[in-house]
Image: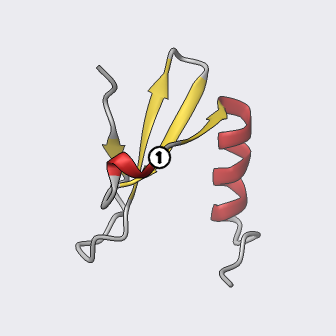
Amino acid sequence: MTKWRKSSRSTDNGDCVETALFAGEHVGMRDSKNPAGGTLTADRATFTAFIAAVKADRIGRR
């Protein structure tokens, strides 16, 4: 069974992303409001680079 986890920085407004580790090599991401709506999967290196870009504010909102 996959163990999904919500970020400790999530707020109570419901806009949350959950992550899960798959077989130690891939990370899954999904919308906590719609867990059956699909999963985005990336290898750990890509996920780590994505998180670093978000933290450095290199990914903007449109």
Relative image position of residue 31 (x, y in whole percent): 41, 56
Report the colour scheme: secondary structure
Residue at position x 35%, y 46% from top?
36
As rendered, which of 15 and 33 lies closer to the eye? 33
As rendered, which of 57 and 47 lies closer to the eye? 47
Horizontally, is 15 left or right of 21 in the view? left
**Residue 55, quarter of picture:** bottom right
As rendered, which of 20 and 34 lies closer to the eye? 34
Q: Please, is residue 48 above or below residue 51 in the view? A: above
Which residue is label 1 attached to?
38
Residue at position x 59%, y 26% from top?
26
Relative image position of residue 24 (x, y in whole percent): 54, 17
Horizontally, is 45 left or right of 16 in the view? right
Q: Residues within 10 Å of mark 1 (few under 14, many from 20)?
A: few
Residue at position x 76%, y 69% from top?
58
Horizontally, is 61 left or right of 1 in the view? right
